[in-house]
Amino acid sequence: MAGELTLRVITPDRIVVDEPVESVQIPALDGSMGILPRHAPMVAALQVGVLRYRGKSGEKVLFVSEGFAEVRDNLLRVVCEAGETAGEIDEKRAREAEQRARERLSRKGEAATAAETFDQLRAEAALRRALMRLKVLEYGSRDRVRS
Ligand code: ATP
């Protein structure tokens, strides 16, 4: 339909979502950003987080990893390293990833070398991915109750 916003979320191995939407909240690097139909063209970097949107069947949430978003001609393209709907997230795997990352972080004292600093940053990033996946699961189950 003319004037309708389309959300397309693409990862290296698949298209996670491609559908008409009423509104989208993306986890931009500098905070959550709302996108409505007829949004001005823009590009924004994304942080690992929760993408929320309102589609034909109500509110939905997605996990998105690092990437970027681009809006042009009523098409919001999100290109990210990984993306999953609430129904696709494996809770056990996310909890195990959280546990592993917390263990790695707790073993570290002050990072003394560049390699240790790098390991710590990787563990922090892994922890954030795990926590955001668990958040999407939590929001997803609430949204299923509402819609
Ligand atoms: P893990 O340590 O469990 O692999 P990760 O955060 O390092 O987690 P990513 O690098 O973000 O994983 O993703 C690698 C691939 O695995 C992607 O295709 C992603 O969609 C998928 N993936 C990772 N964790 C989960 C999960 N808990 N449920 C479903 N798919 C997942």
Image (cartoon, rainbow, N blue to C red):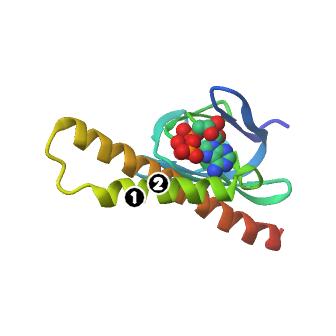
Q: Seen in the image, is 88 located left or right of residue 121?
A: right
Mark 1 neighbour density, 10 Å: few (under 14) some (14–19) many (20 or more)? few
Q: Name the residue under label 1.
A: 103
Q: Is residue 51 visible?
A: no
Question: What residue is drawn where x is 50% and y is 58%?
Answer: 98
Q: Name the residue under label 2.
A: 100
**Residue 108 placement (x, y as % from top left):** 26, 55
Question: What residue is drawn where x is 64% and y is 59%?
Answer: 136
Relative to 94, say whether 142 is above or below: below
Could you tell me which secondary element the residue under label 1 belongs to?
A: helix
The amino acid pointed to by label 1 is Glu
Whether label 2 lies within 8 Å of ligand 1 gets the answer yes
The amino acid pointed to by label 2 is Arg
**Residue 72 placement (x, y as % from top left):** 61, 30
Q: Quadrant of the N terminus?
A: top right
Please name whichever residue, 116 or 63, is drawn nearer the observer in this view of the structure.
116
Please name whichever residue, 136 or 45, is drawn nearer the observer in this view of the structure.
136
Mark 2 neighbour density, 10 Å: few (under 14) some (14–19) many (20 or more)? some
